[in-house]
Structures are given as C-alpha cells and as structure tokens.
Image: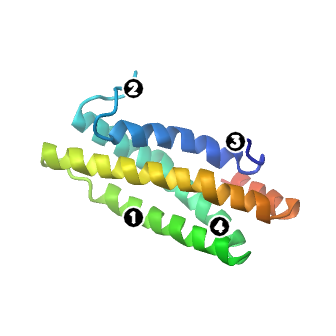
Amino acid sequence: MKRHPSLVPLSREHHGALILARLLQVNTPPYKGLPGDTEGKASYALKFYNNELIAHFDKEEKVFKLLYSANDHIADLIKIVVQEHVQLHRLFDNLRFDNSTEMIQQLDTIGKVLEAHIRREERELFPAIEETFCEVTITEINRILSSH
C-alpha cells in the first residue's frame, strides 16, 4: 500500500518493529543475524524497545494530538492505538529474565500484541488519516515528524 509521504517515516519504522514482533512469537522460524535463544531475544527486544519503540510511540502520539478531534472514527482508533502503547510499555517494563518458560510466554505475548498493533495502524488508522485530512494537515504531520 502506498502511503502519503508524510506517513512514510512511521511506516518505515514499523518494518523493524514487525520483524521484532515475529521474532518474539513462539514457533517462528529464525531470522538471520538475529538471536535465536530466549535470553538473546529478550535482550534484543528490550534494546529495540528502548532505542526505537519508545521514541516511535512518542512521535505517533504527538501526531495523534493534532488529529484526534477530526471525527469519532479517527478518535476511536487513536484511543485504541494509544491504549495499545500503554499496554506495550507495561509488557516491556514487566519482562523478567527469571524463568525460561515464563519468559517465552512473555515474549510471545509482546510479539502478538506488537504485531496486531502495527497492523491496526497500517490497515486502519493510517488509511483513515489519509482519507480524512487535507494536504495542509498532513503537511503539519510531516513538520511534527521532522522535528524529531
């Protein structure tokens, strides 16, 4: 799907997050160059979260503040997406390296929630933004994203 140029930076960031999401899920084939053991996956996930996802969520939420009042559909989608951000922050913050079986389940949960979250943004929220907002507003999105 072709994205409006102002949303492309967020979509590009989703690519790495989708790879992480799939890597963390149970019964996923190995990814070349990425960890295959549970502790390696957990370490990689926390590093990616701290170095990429926190800033990504922050950028999105700054954009969403601009768009929230457009209509009920956009507002409802934004509420869901922001709630998912909160849930993902909690899941990453609660990731523990104390029990291999529990950690495998925690990583699987993070992977599934992260994948569903990204798919919602790409398949529902971003198309709704592109359909709803004029070029001036979408250009403002670009300005917000460029300031990061």
Residue 64's disc is 4
Q: Which residue is mark 2?
A: 31
Q: Where 127 sits versus 65, above or below? A: above
**Which one is earlier in the sequence, the residue at label 4 or at label 1?**
4
Q: Quadrant where the N terminus lies?
A: top right
Q: Is residue 109 visible?
A: yes
Res. 144 visible in picture: no
Q: Which mark is residue 87?
A: 1
Mark 2 or mark 1: whose residue is earlier in sequence: 2
Which residue is found at the position 39% from the left and 26% from the top? 31
The amino acid type found where label 4 is placed reads Phe
Q: Where residue 5 sits: x, y (%)?
A: 78, 46
- Alpha carbon separation for disc pair 2 and 4: 33 Å
Label 4, label 1: how far apart the Cα atoms are: 17 Å
The amino acid pointed to by label 1 is: Gln
Amino acid carrying label 2: it is Tyr
Q: Which mark is residue 1?
A: 3
Q: Earlier in the sequence, mark 3 or mark 1?
A: 3
Q: Residue at x 78, y 60 (%)?
A: 131
Q: CA distance from mark 3 to mark 2?
A: 24 Å
| 148 relative to 41 in the view: left or right | right
* Amino acid bearing label 3: Met
Mark nearer the N terminus (2 vs 4): 2
